[in-house]
Amino acid sequence: MMTAIAPVTPPADFRPFRRPSVPSGQDPLTYGHDKVEAALRAAYFSLFSVPDPNSQDVPIPAELPFGLGWIQTLLEAIPGVTPLLAGVEVNEAPLRLKTATELAACQLLGNQQVGQSVATVHIDWTPIPWSYRANPDTRPPQTILNPFASQRFEMLNGEFRFQDRDHSGFHGFGSGRTFPNFPRGLSLKIGAVINILEGFGDFAGHHGTIVVNGEITPPEGLNLNLMVRVVDPDGSLSTQKPLPPFSKRPFPDPSATFMMFSGESDPDQPAELLADESGGWRLELTERLRLVELDFGVPGGKLVSRATTGPVVGRVSSEYIFTPGGRNAPLSVRTAHTELTFGDDRIGSQIGTLRADLVEGRGFPTPVRDLSSPLLRVGGFGPIQGGSGEFRDAQGMLSVNGAMSLFPRLSSHLYVFRFVDPDGRLRPYPADGVAPKPSEEA
Amino acid sequence: MVDTTQAKPEAESGPGGVLSLPVVSRVFDFLSQLEIDDVTFLLQKGAYFSLIFRTNPTLGLDRMPTQAPYMPPTLRGFQVDEVPRRFKMAVERRQQTLMGVNRIGEQMARIRFQWLVIPEGHQGHPDRRPPLLPFLPDISQRFELFDAELRFNDREASGARLYGTGRTYPVPSASGRELEVGAVCEVLEGLGCLRGLRGTMVLTGRIRPPHEMVFNIILRFVDPDEMLRTHSAIPPIASEEEEDHLEETFLVFIGEPDPERPTTLRTSPSGRLLGSNVYERIRLVDLDFSPDEKQGFKTRMIKGPIVGSVRAQLTFNPMRLARLTPIQTSDGVFEFEDLEGRSIGTLEANMTEGRSIRTSLRGTYIPVFRFGGFGPILRGTGEFSGARGMMSMNSIISVFPRTLSNLYILRDAGRTFRLQALSAWA
């Protein structure tokens, strides 16, 4: 079954300061709290994307102007050298990724296990100019991939299909940015945000956002976390029952450790909405951070997600800066002064801090039945800028996938950290490259 | 197996004076560093089981009166038959100090042994009953854990047959007479899914005569193939009702070689081996285990950040041919640090009684030594002022290369260093 989702509300209609009409005597900042809290519920599908062994990636060589095509011919003739690329038709076979962030011995640890391939993904991955307004309807001008400089890119014609009974999945469109690892190699860290345009099977009628966090080595190297967050107010895509176990595989990227935290509104520090001089608006947001364990499966042929939140282990404070993106375009989002503090100063417990702003993000105003104001789905990413304590010298990327309501002020975000951790310092097992025993089940 | 805990460490034995020869000394230094990282990693591969049990004060213990003719009918030991519970020990940084977090969980096993008083200097044996001696709570005495067996509640009733010896240390307490207790047992035979594994059990606790006992036991099995290890989270302890009844605090740390201060050999002026000067970094550690339908058990050890160092003089002769060798430490000082590396306090404690067991280990060229030991905490300074109780070790060391993995359990007799269950994480 194929169901198109209503198009994103044009930002022109999204007026963050317009107070919703509420019954007299009610405060719009608190009215409808329970309904909004339910509307913020989401199902998470965490995947680790690797190349599809059955369908190779297809590099798209750049067409060079001014008779310089001989350069491409020359590069193609040299074994092991990749010609200049204008894009890649990417075919991925994402693996089921089970993640759990744990607190043990006064430190936070990321426990990650991958299982079997559970889906197929196809996208046309295309670098784009900085000034180009990414959109799903037009082809961007040719831009040559440069592994030495940060570039924007688009993901066109995205199709994602799970291997469940109904072949659930979605069409999506997204854009992101590369962060070169040069001079440590020609690989690129990437962050991206994808909006679900159309859902199939169990995803039919659901809005959702995917954030991408990982590393690629064009044309074929690929190690990405895809975090799919699907709005699920009635819980039809969620379960608390145990999921079928899977056979573990060695983790495809032993140099990466993923840690995830579930952010929720801090009742002690309500968010504050402010107008921005540039015509946009800002939200000063503080959230409590909880440990979270994420997994999903297909019990009885139906796709379901299982999220188990643990205790509060810290707080995040951030200033979200929203800028209207133009007609029919999502809001542009970035953050400033984002700091995550783990531990609790009030009782003298200190684990560490992390600083990481979203350098790029999207905001998708999303109407929800029975709510007078739309929710704002938010996805974004940005490099880790530093830290202290356990996270002193931390490197990697943060991606955020969540949603917020402005009336009342409520939010729910998933913070996904991909740490560069070749020694396994942030994992609960040593850095000996020893994968969890295949016989051990989740 | 003969208990040699009381045998005098042969301080002046070993390879004669050859260590004074420069060539021999250089060969020793070379061997001391050979593949040190690999061997250190191997030593750390262990399966740990932490349990706690207390006697039911209303039921008491089966007391074992002397039956010797011409002796007055005095107590010479106890018959212990108890049900140990899972015991989670952890340490957290709070403000500028370190606090123990102790959680008592579900009943996990059954332990039975005869606790028998033995003479000083007695070399015990698991198959030979000791001579009869009365239990005297006012003096320090040695005792034997005779005919000991621990059985877990898993499907295979896994466990171990054990034998070991220990010592009592009378201490003043608010409630009158009390005895601190330490003991080291060797696993004579692994049972069920622990069959074939070599392990050491260290027991520490207290006895409040006439019949109240609280003991923590740490079983450490050598598990180079990681048969019992899990990488997944272990279900947390659900019930914490028992915690409030625990009068003491357990803190656990793991020691590892200090790369900036390597362990050095101690030799006599004539070049004979006396032992070593040990320097270690100590880390927080999280130990836990739970039954598992497939593996029998899942155990997990997670090392945390460095929180200090320990230095001591080890008196131990690895050249002895005997399988069991006495081992002791002196001048032992733990120094704990805050996040900035500033000292926050010290604890002085020595392993006054210990037993090492030569153990062959695949991946090492020559056998390594498992050892367990214990001794009273002598003094605390700074944040640890007023600490009193017992330090125990459950360890494994290699002489060539010179490396170690020492598990330290500090048992403070009070609750000063205990963090209550209610915390920021609640």
Image: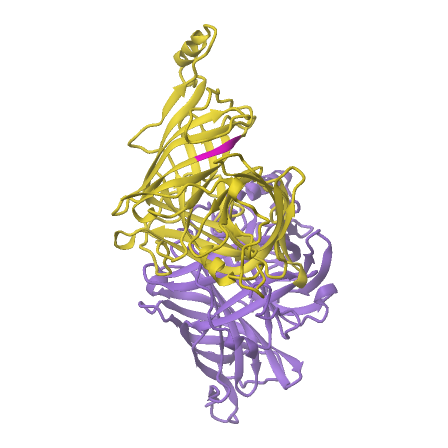
Quadrant in the picture for residue B381: bottom right
Q: Residue at x 65, y 79 (%)?
A: B171
Res B354 seen here: no
Depicted B282 relative to depicted B134: above or below: above
Compare residues B399 and A36 and report the one nearer the observer: A36
Q: Position of residue B32 (x, y in %)?
A: 57, 44
Question: Could you tell whether A265 is left or right of A65 in the image?
Answer: right
Compare residues B311 and A126 and report the one nearer the observer: A126
Q: Residue at x 36, y 44 (%)?
A: A249
Which chain is depicted yellow? A
Query: Quadrant of the image for the C terminus of chain B?
Result: bottom right
- Which residues are the magenta region? A174-178
Depicted A208 relative to depicted A372: above or below: above
Question: Could you tell whether A232 is left or right of B379 in the image?
Answer: left
Res A275 seen here: yes
Colour scheme employed for the rendering of this structure: by chain
Question: Chain B drawn in what color?
Answer: purple
Q: Position of residue A222 (x, y in %)?
A: 42, 33
Majority secondary structure of the magenta segment? strand
Q: Is residue A267 magenta?
A: no
Depicted B372 relative to depicted A376: above or below: below
Query: Quadrant of the image for the N terminus of chain B?
Result: bottom left
Compare residues A379 and B167 and report the one nearer the observer: A379
Q: Is residue A177 magenta?
A: yes
Question: Could you tell whether A262 is left or right of B391 in the image?
Answer: left
Q: Residue at x 67, y 50 (%)?
A: B270
Q: Position of residue B213 (x, y in %)?
A: 53, 80
Q: Position of residue B85 (x, y in %)?
A: 46, 73
Question: Could you tell whether B229 is left or right of A334 in the image?
Answer: left
Instruction: List the single residue furthest toward the front.
Output: A24
Compare residues A23 and B330 and report the one nearer the observer: A23
Instruction: List the single residue furthest toward the top.
Output: A67
